[in-house]
Amino acid sequence: MKALSDLERLNNYDIILASASPRRSFLLEELGLKFKTVTNNEIKESFPEHLIAGDIPLYLAKLKARSFTSLLKEKTLLITADTIVWLNNELIGKPRDTEEAKKMLRNLSGKMHFVYTGVCIASIHKELAFAAESKVHFRHLTDGEIDYYVKKYKPFDKAGAYGIQEWIGYIGVDRLEGSYFNVMGLPVQKLYSALIHFIESEIPRKGVNKQL
């Protein structure tokens, strides 16, 4: 009998992506995974003040996972994620309006910033969480370029007020260190390996939380 491939084994699970992000859905589809999406608009994405950098989205990804525990059954895999932009030791969130989006992009212009994504994989038996880091170098952006991008693309649902896969990424990103897909919102290379590890590992004792 032919052994199942890793992808076939994963698709024997009921995979749930708890995210409203179309970019994360797109990336999971490109991995060849079969999944359904769920959302919960009542989750308050707050975190302890002492957390910095990659610890913030890692905490939030776990927080999101624990709000969907009622969906977990045998042969269910839940995936949650959170992405932040980190500039000069400060969190850059999602812009509330046009002016804030322009301000964020002016602050990112000509500088290097970090993008961190935290991911949590959970089943009825255990959870596994990890964070990925990318360094994004922007060239100097003119006010005209910023105005055009914000007006046309309206990046109000994006951390740092930009999507690397959009026009601003084409003309503005001078250099990238790390995963491009992490900047899009999901480090799919690391996620795929983590999913394989997750289904191959033994069920831990109750209360044990493994992390990569």
Image: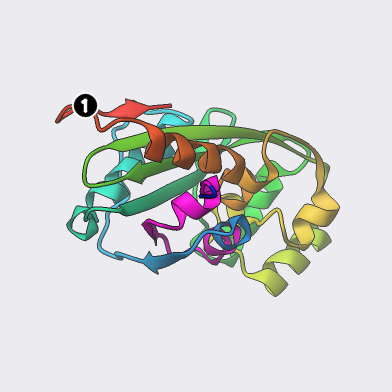
Depth check: 116 or 17 in front?
17
- Say above or below: 111 vs 25: above
Q: Quadrant of residue 211?
A: top left
Callout 1 amino acid: Val
Q: Position of residue 132 (x, y in %)?
A: 54, 34
Q: How many marks?
A: 1
Q: Is residue 155 left or right of residue 117?
A: right
- Say above or below: 144 vs 199: below
Q: Quadrant of residue 210?
A: top left
Q: Is residue 209 left or right of residue 118?
A: left
- Say above or below: 203 vs 18: above
Is residue 7 at all visible to an observer of this figure? yes
Circle 1 residue? 208
Q: Position of residue 201 (x, y in %)?
A: 36, 31
- 14 in magenta: yes
Q: Is residue 78 left or right of residue 124?
A: right
Depth check: 71 or 116 in front?
71
Is residue 141 at all visible to an observer of this figure? no
Q: Position of residue 31 (x, y in %)?
A: 60, 55
Direction left: furthest residue: 206
- SS assignment at label 1: loop
Depth check: 126 or 153 in front?
126
Check the image and tell me how it is coloured: rainbow
Depth check: 94 or 163 in front?
163
Residue at 16% from the left image edge and 29% from the top image edge: 207
Q: Residues within 10 Å of mark 1 (few under 14, many from 20)?
A: few
Residue at 52% from the left image edge and 42% from the top image edge: 191
Point out the image quarter for the C terminus.
top left
Q: Position of residue 133 (x, y in %)?
A: 58, 32
Q: Quadrant of residue 165?
A: bottom right
What residue span does the magenta drawing correspond to? Answer: 3-27
